[in-house]
Image (tube, helix red, strand yellow):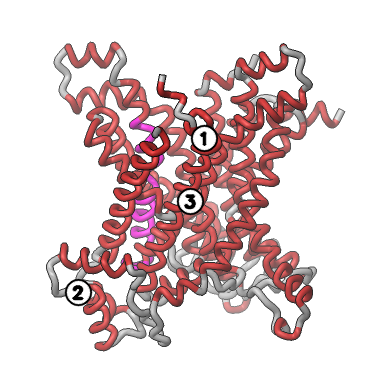
Amino acid sequence: MVYRFLLSIFSSRYILLSLGLFIVGTMSLVAIFAPFIAPYHPTQINVEAVLHPPSSTYLLGTDNLGRDVFSRLVYGARISLWVGFVAVGISLAIGILLGLIAGYFGRLVDEVIMRFVDVMLCFPSFFLILAVIAFLEPSLTNIMIVIGLTSWMGVARLVRAETLTLREREFVHAARLGGAGTWRLLLIHILPNAMPPVLVSATLGVAAAILTESALSFLGLGVQPPTPSWGNILMEGKDVMGVAYWLSIFPGLSILITVLGYNLLGESVRDLLDPRLKRN
Amino acid sequence: MHLVKLALAKLLWLGIVLLGITLLSFWIIHLAPGSPTDMQTTLSPTAGAEARERLEKIYGLDQPIHIQYLNWVQRVVKLDFGTSLSGDHRPVWDKIKERIPLTLSLNIISLVLILGISIPIGIFSALYQGGLFDRSMTIFVFIGFAMPSFWLALLLMMALGIYWPVFPISGVTSLDFEYLSFWGKALDLARHLTLPVFVFTITGLAGMSRFMRTSMLEVLRQDYILTARAKGLPTRVVVFKHGLRNALMPVITILGLSVPTLIGGSVIVESIFSLPGLGQLFYHSVLARDYPLIMGNLVLVSVLTLAGNLLADLGYALADPRIRLGAGRQ
């Protein structure tokens, strides 16, 4: 019975898709309506309630300055999603542009761009990000830009591969014979047809960017306190983990659930798009 | 003949990528607004006129940019990255050298564990696709992908270091390490490295087992598997001889690609568990804005990654008779 039940729960990949949509939707709403959801201001200090355990007044407890953890997590959602979207936006812009150019023009241009991709892939991206942050300043803007600049390679390869096949298709030849210019051909005829897999990788990219931001903030090289980010709340929680478990548990759980949501969404859409994976 | 051609093409690629790595790294030095020495004097607490002079000398900042680059490359080739800006003034290469063994062994142990666990998981998930094992593994994979490694490390430290103190949570050795017997030393090391290796392994496991499953499913769909089955070969032979051998091929490639992720992960794991490896050295050098040390590290890890990729390529060529024997000639 239990076995059958478990099977039926996960029998449809639409369930994974809906779960992903639900998590992503909820988190976006939380981020947008943060001021209405958070019971306290995220940086409001209360010296009389330092490291207060979870209770009805402080739903998820307070930190070492008496700030409400739940409110900080709610505002932290804003930071995480904002970083995710901007960083992925940057990586999409670069990846799509270089991928289109490499795939369409081929030859030397393709060779140069793809070798550049190889070079970028040789740097462990976390080392590269940290090195750049060391030369600039750790700030919200800088980490969004740096994450974007170091994560476009996958998109570029994907768009290049799509462009290589699309440029030989009849409708592209037809458009060219119809007098469409190179950029019109690339942006209006080729790009929209290459978009579905790119959007999937963008969704997964948001998850990866959120993870990277939280890791940077956890190391003290990302979003700087007092601005709340899930990563820097965990960093503060690390020093008091023996006495205040809530500071280490809940921010991590927020990261896990959000990243899981974006991954579920991306992976299930990918499966739905892939005709080879269709069963029955 | 075929192999020689392949090797030459690979060497050319290697040269181009190495050139790219040095150019990009060099560009990062010049990323900061103003010159690196300005940054040095205004931002670093340890910097002064003396550090400024030293940096000027290392990077030859009064020279034209292409001369600067050539000089820098000349010294990098000789593993001369200058001296650290920190109090000890030691050569960067010496500081890096002593850190390599720990990071390398952590990564290799984890990699072996990841492969040893994820390959069987992948095989069984693929063989019984849609079964309870496959479905539970799918859930595990999704959670593994979403799990921040530093959070997993924190949870383990809290659970097994503080609430039930089973494992030590920082460093590589105990205080009384010197006085332990050989086996005592080995056990002490193992106890210190258990949690870090566990974190490394879990974070790599999800991706690799998923990949192995996909690869195996792909192979099991092929005609030659049907042929083998039709010949009446036992399932064991079909799966492990005809199937597994072919399914393992792409794993070699993905292994090379996973090197940067593993090395990148060592920054987090080593700084959380206070392990004196490359990752921790890099983290500290970033915090202290020790530029020569940062650059030395960056160049070294990218070259290590490149070496990993090359080994994977070589392994692939050796394992695939079509490449090894050049069967594509006809």
Residue B35: give its label. Answer: none
Mark 3 and mark 2 lie on one chain; the one further toward the N terminus is 2
Same chain under badges 3 and 1? The reply is: no
Instruction: Identify the residue position indicated by label 3 in the image.
Output: B308
Is B275 positioned to the left or the right of B60 in the image? Answer: right
Percent from the top left, x then y, of residue A194? Answer: 36, 26
Q: Please tell me which residue is depicted at 77% across the width and 32% down the height of the picture.
A: B132
SS at mark 2 in the image = loop
Instruction: Identify the residue position indicated by label 2 in the image.
Output: B60
Between residues B84 and B304, which one lies in front from this camera angle?
Answer: B304
Which of the two discs, 3 and 1, sits closer to the camera? 3
One can see residue A78 in this view: no
Residue A138 lies in the magenta-colored region: yes
SS at mark 1 in the image = helix
How crowded is the residue under tag 1: few (<14 C-alpha within 10 Å), some, or many (20+)?
many
Instruction: Give the chain letter at badge 2.
Output: B
Q: Quadrant of the N terminus of chain A?
A: top right
Tell me which corner region of the image, top left, top right, bottom left or bottom right, holds residue A94.
top left
Image height check: is A274 above or below A26? Answer: above
Residue bounds of the magenta highlight? A134-160
